[in-house]
Amino acid sequence: MVLGIVSEEIYKKKIDTLIIPVMEDDEIYTDALIKGLIGNAHKTGDFKKKYKETLTLYQSEDIEAKRIIFLGLGKKDKINLDKCRDAIGSVIRKCIKLKVSSANIVVPQKTKTAKTVSVPNMMEGAFLANYLFDKYKEKKKFTLLKNINFVVAKDEVIQLKKLINEVQTKCEGTFIARDWVSTPANDLTVSHFSKQISDLASKENIKCTILDEKYLKKNGFNALLAVGKGSAEKPKLVIMEYKPSKATKKIALVGKAVMFDSGGLSLKPGSSMEDMKVDMAGGAAVASTIITAARLKLDAHIVAAIPMVENMPSGTATKPGDIVKCYNGKTVEILNTDAEGRLIMADTLAYMVEKYNPQTIVDVATLTGACMVALGEHIAGVFSNNEEKLDALMDSSKSTDERCWKMPLPDDYNKLLKSSIADLRNISTTRYGGSITAALFLQNFVSQSDWIHIDIAGPAHISKPTSYCPAGGTGFGVRLLVDFLMR
Ligand code: BES
Ligand code: ZN
Ligand code: ZN
């Protein structure tokens, strides 16, 4: 796919599909040709310019285009950043269905309102929407667009080319994560995932180390090992480091990668297990974020850690009641083997804090069904011991529309995690507030570091498509974290 910037010169040539966004209550173009085309659309009487409404015309005397799609943007005081992504995304998905190979999107010109129509967000919506996960289909029903061009004034071409590269890199990062999350657990095991990550890292300026079972055993990663014990696939801890010479800040990222979560001996019921290939989405987001950061040549020192396991029941599996000593010396009574994410994250967080002493540590995990119950399929729960840094993340959330909601870390709830014979129990004594007690559990392993925990159990994947993401893995977290790292 090529995302490009072209000048208005193309109106003189023969083109495939022209897309013209139109504001309901304002003129956003100065170009007489485009104004004329909109006038023609208006004359049909079928186009009210309502938000996401479209009209397709197949013939025009003024321009040699195969088709012209007019896209309503609705009223000027209602449009916002995400609606720009959403509207353009929906029209690109329409183009995929129409088997369009090349689309040219006219960018609103420098009139007063055009400023509220965000060009970077339009680009992002277009690029994110041009994605399919159909590698398991024998017959491919749809094809992606080969070209998406943005038509701008001649003097804006150079400036916008730089911007478009940045947008493209971020979106490609999101696609890597989407692909991983949608890939089933038989095709993405611990070995496959770690190999794919190290292959990608070797193409960038990223050092990648894979700590194997032997290393983990020797160095006391007993909680991580306990989760992997029931599976034939051995656990691994993947460490990625991007360290540009002029880096000023050091940030650690940790992502949960349970390649499949059966629940272990505390086996999940069949229907809850169906989606459990997505339990590595935190790891996918984190790996893809550091790769994207390297491609964008960000100036932060970033270390990412991805604990990888398969959580399976078997004769060698961890049994409810087992007690393990974690990397930081704390003991945990594992009363439910399905609360495994916090165990692998515990060792990894403690290791990262000890080894790298980062200014900020951010973890991303499909940690609790409770978070999904609380916030639904589209919103992540965020927890932090540092209000200022959490606010910065919330700013990234607003500008990327990867939605997050602040959740509390109430000190008194810690008593719900007290064990009578070990330091901690891995599940709360009540079934209420499950995402909070999971976050509090993790807090025991970050010492005094500034830490943000993002529970993405909801938005890691979606069951119904949105305008710029088909059903399946969403790649949630990549654009959010890249934006956070850029701040
Ligand atoms: N991987 C699940 C959480 C999850 C649920 C992710 C739904 C995505 C969608 C996690 O390991 C888990 O099983 N959590 C348990 C914790 C409980 C045993 C305390 C849960 O949420 O039920
Ligand atoms: Zn689980
Ligand atoms: Zn899990």
Image (tube, grey):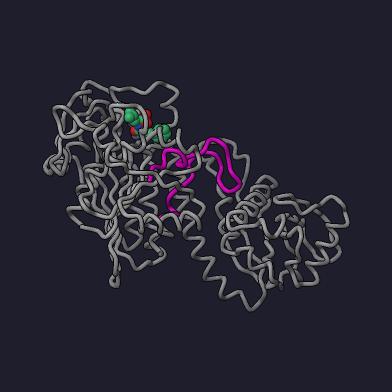
Is residue 224 or residue 113 the one in the foreground?
113
Name the residue rendered at 14%, 36% in the picture. Answer: 325
Give, as a single range, the part of the protein colored magenta. Answer: 454-481
Image position, residue 338 (x, y; %): 31, 28
Image position, residue 399 (x, y; %): 50, 58
Q: Is residue 370 above or below residue 133?
A: above
Image position, residue 82 (x, y; %): 58, 54
Q: Is residue 410 above or below residue 434?
A: below
Left or right: 471 as drawn, with respect to 283 = right
Image position, residue 184 (x, y; %): 42, 35
Q: Quadrant of the C terminus?
A: bottom left
Left or right: 394 as drawn, with respect to 427 = right
Name the residue rendered at 28%, 40% in the picture. Answer: 440
Name the residue rendered at 63%, 68% in the picture. Answer: 115
Is residue 56 or residue 319 the one in the foreground?
319
Q: For residue 41, say whether it is visible.
A: yes
Left or right: 23 as drawn, with respect to 274 = right
Q: Quadrant of residue 15?
A: bottom right
Magenta-colored segment: predominant secondary structure: loop
Is 20 one of the magenta-colored residues?
A: no
Is 479 one of the magenta-colored residues?
A: yes
Q: For residue 277, say whether it is visible.
A: no
Q: Quadrant of the N terminus?
A: bottom right
Left or right: 35 as drawn, with respect to 328 = right
